[in-house]
Amino acid sequence: MLCDGKDRICQAVTVKIVAKQMNAIQNLPPGPLDIVGDIHGEIEALTALLRHLGYDADGNHPRQRTLIFVGDLVDRGPDSPAVLKLVERLVKTGRAFAILGNHEINLLANEAKDGSGWYFDERVESDNVKYAPFIRATFEEKIAAVAFLLTLPIALERPDLRIIHAAWIAADIEKLREVQLENVLSKYKEWDAAADNYAKDLRPKIREELKTWPYGLEDQSKQPPFLHAHAEHDSVSQMMNPLKILTSGVEREASKPFYASGKWRFLDRVKWWDEYDEPVPVVIGHYWRRYHSLANPEYGKGEPGMFDDIPSNAWHGKRGNVFCIDYSVGGRWSERKFGEKNKTLAKLGALKWPERVLIFDDGVEIPSIGPD
């Protein structure tokens, strides 16, 4: 079941789903690949990167390469509708493939989050403060967006490579292997409902915490105390839902509140790759890596430690066979708002496979370090 009967956008979608009879975990195509990181509505960066990679307007490449998009196509940037239209057109040519990121899952689940004002009316006012100007989707574009996203898998794999938005956790991958695309959204809501029911005893504690902290959690200027009931609720919500784990990662209670992705948070993202002990390389997005220079790398979006002591072009993890290709282009809104001082830090990148070469939207091309 794709819609819950309440979302009129979803109800308006008439998908003769190609998704039907297709599983949430699918095969990567053969041949050389160009794996593109999180785009977040940055249409100019995307078109520039595709040009540097050598693709024409229909996604054709003179050396028969294939584009792979790791998710988080939308939110925060100036033109999410244009990014979706371009990626959909490339996918329909058969020369590109895409998977869902957590931002697409949020959209399909009708969960309005920071930076999604291009789609959700209730986010426009608050998002204008940070992200304006941005193009808002028409009703028809919203219908088209939902229809397209409902056809995308959660992960892609072949013997030499795995691609997932945030975390390749074997137990959670197995839970999705037999789920057909037409049932992904209903499974997400089923797992969410189970987590919500499990955490129902926390609701009175959360209300009490909010009485002591009436400022909300989106105001960066007002740091809350550590709200333990909020942390426990967020942990249950995250870790009881396999789709959240695969698209937004493994999380645990933080040592102190930190501000990231538009709100104060109480859970740290875990470096799951330090426990990944399988031989097949994994390429991910999601984690806002920063590329500045090999001598002076800077990382992150308010969560220190995810890439400490890791060169910004290096593979990482227990076996050195996980690579994050998200180079924080989603942060360009802050460059537009506050000036050019961090311009070199926010890029859109792609990883050439099997060459293991990085190329960015400014045309810079460098080898990655590892895996052997």
Image (cartoon, helix red, strand yellow):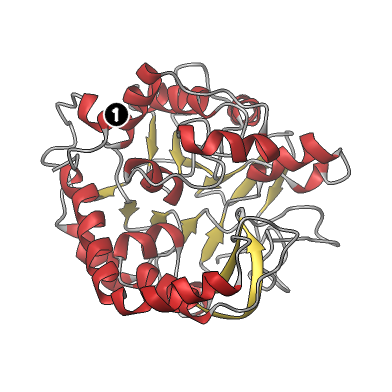
Q: Position of residue 293 (x, y in %)?
A: 82, 55
State the residue position of label 1.
9
Mark 1 lies on a secondary structure that is helix
| Image quadrant in which you'd find residue 120 | top left
Residue 321 visible in rendering: yes
**Circle 1: residue type:** Ile
Residue situated furthest left in the rendering: 21
Quarter of the image with the C terminus is bottom right
Residue 213 vertical placement versus 41 (above, below): below
| Image quadrant in which you'd find residue 236 | bottom left
Q: Position of residue 249 (x, y in %)?
A: 45, 65
Is 75 on the left-hand or right-hand side of 151?
A: right
Rendered residue at 45%/60% (across/down): 248
Residue 100 visible in rendering: no
Is 332 on the left-hand or right-hand side of 204?
A: right
- Mark 1 burial class by Cα count in 10 Å: few <14, some 14-19, many 20+: some
